[in-house]
Amino acid sequence: MTQTAPGSSAVTTTGDGRFASLDPRTGEVVAHHPVHTPQQVADAVAQARRASNWWQELGFDGRKARLDAWRRLLVKRLDEAAGLISAETGKPAADAKLEMVIVIDHLHWAAKNAERVLRKRRVPAGLLMSNQSATIEYLPVGVVGVIGPWNYPAFTPMGSIAYALAAGNTVVFKPSELTPGVGTWLSDTLAEIVPEHPVLSVVTGFGETGAALCRSGVDKLAFTGSTATGKRVMAACAESLTPVLVECGGKDALIVDFDADVALAADAAVWGAMSNAGQTCIGVERVYVHEDVAEEFTAAVRKLAAKVRPGGDPGADLGPITMPSQVDIIRSHVQDAIDKGAKALVGGVESVRPPFVEPVVLADVPEDSLAITDETFGPTITINRVRDTDEAIRLANAGRYGLGGTVFSKARGEQLARRLKAGMVSINGVVAFAAIPSLPFGGIGDSGFGRIHGEDGLREFARPQAVARRKFKPLLNPMSFTRGAGTVRQLLAIVKLRYGRK
Ligand code: NDP
């Protein structure tokens, strides 16, 4: 078996047009996958386009039957999927299983609700156009390209894939070079249920394969990954005016108000920051805690975080840092914070032991530190005390990201949530919104735009078509060269009566 030193490199190329995905815990090769060329990407998109008519013609019921059967297959083979997720990312088996549970719930919701949300419906035509029948229908866009990251290699892309398929599109998916096996497994299992046509195909490789997908003529491109790559994806898609959905990174804050359940908030902060070794776009990276409860909260976080143990063994709480280059970023953020005067309450620079990083809790971190301004993507957390929640909101909103947020407060949770510059907020819980399929997921600012999940997530992969159908001859028809001299005058009289008064 080929092996590289753990943490040295996450992928190796074989020289025969293939690359290996590696287990980041051990450096062992999980499997080899092809590096697909732009021509092969174009071929996959052409095949998906041919499959698209057939998939559309199945209708909502036909597609629901297939997606429900796929869901049942995913339940049956959940352990297999989780094993592959663990092997390619290094995350603990229980977390990989939890990821699949959430995937399955989303797939169920998308298949169940697609018809209700997207089917043709009548809307009022209004007084002036009352001779018309007005309808809206959300039709499939055609072929959707999906580019996904490695941190949740099933959950994250399935937020686009499940909803795009349920909306009647076919999909070509480019998984991260670190997790090609999970993407291929998803496509292979759907092909068992839908053997007739490739409604979900996978192209593997590096950034160039993703770039080729952007330029392949897909009807929409759904990207999830870093902000820097998101900008490149958008620029490539701009060449052909391909619409994009961009789900990028975050720097989410958790606010603890003076009346919060402090034990609950501390538990949520540690899970939100450390689970998946902090490699979560909606992970908690910063805490702003009211000074009245700061001491109690910090002591509770310290106690909990000190017990969290990374490792490659089955009993470990956290896996390794999946992408080796991230280790240097995590180290530099911790070092920079300490250099600028932050206190390390748990761990420190020495906690970075590739491929693992032990929990790091930093307090009194200057607001211009990298650990506050940039995405760390490691099991680290900053805790800064604030005089009041106005200060907490101001600091939480100061960055350029706006993905998720968390508020712990007994009396003012909703009021504070509303003031956060974030696409999603959990009150008295953490990251709960991501596991609720009916809630739209996405951010603002450097976190991107567009929404996956929920009704908005279904509509994101559809094109609204507005139809006005003449029912009968109107009393007044101003839109004709044969209109009478008084037609517009009469119309104005109606408008004045109808809209000109209180
Ligand atoms: P990257 O931006 O490095 O990569 C994302 C995907 O884009 C990968 O499949 C990558 O392929 C591909 N890619 C790279 N270059 C190009 C290119 N020029 N054109 C097209 N595609 C390209 O992100 P990571 O995989 O490192 O994922 C981590 C990031 O994802 C974090 O910032 C995290 O916050 C964010 N994220 C956001 C989520 C959200 O929903 N908002 C959810 C999960 C993660 P390859 O891997 O082969 O280079």
Image: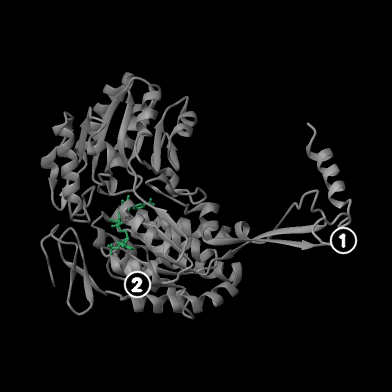
Q: Name above or below for residue 314 compared with residue 141.
A: above
Q: For residue 97, which quarter of the picture?
A: bottom left
Q: Quadrant of residue 481?
A: bottom right
Q: Looking at the image, do the residues carrying marks 1 and 2 touch, with CB atoms under 8 Å apart?
A: no
- Real-space CA distance between mark 1 and mark 2, rounded to the nearest whole angstrom: 54 Å
**Where does the image place residue 379, in percent across and percent down from the top left?**
23, 43
Drawn side of residue 39 relative to residue 72, left or right: left
- Pick the quarter of the image with the C terminus: top right
Q: Is residue 28 left or right of residue 467?
A: left
The answer, for residue 358, to whether it is visible in the render is no
Residue 331 in the image: above or below residue 6 = above
Q: Nearer the viewer, mark 1 or mark 2?
A: 1
Task: Give percent across and percent down for residue 76.
Answer: 41, 66
Label 2: how many Cα within 10 Å (few below 14, some 14–19, many 20+): many
* Horizontal side, residue 373 vs residue 109: left or right: left
In this rendering, would 31 be left or right of 487?
Answer: left
Q: Amino acid at mark 1?
A: Lys
Q: Which mark is residue 473?
A: 1
The residue sitting at 31% across, 36% down in the picture is 269
- Looking at the image, can residue 38 be seen? yes
The disc, 1 or 2, on the residue closer to the chain's N-terminal end is: 2
From what the image shows, is residue 176 above or below residue 419? below
Q: Quadrant of residue 146?
A: bottom left
Secondary structure state at the residue bearing disc 2: loop
Check disc 1 and report its element: helix, strand or loop: loop
- What x and y, as percent, mark residue 226? 32, 53
For disc 2, the marked residue is 203
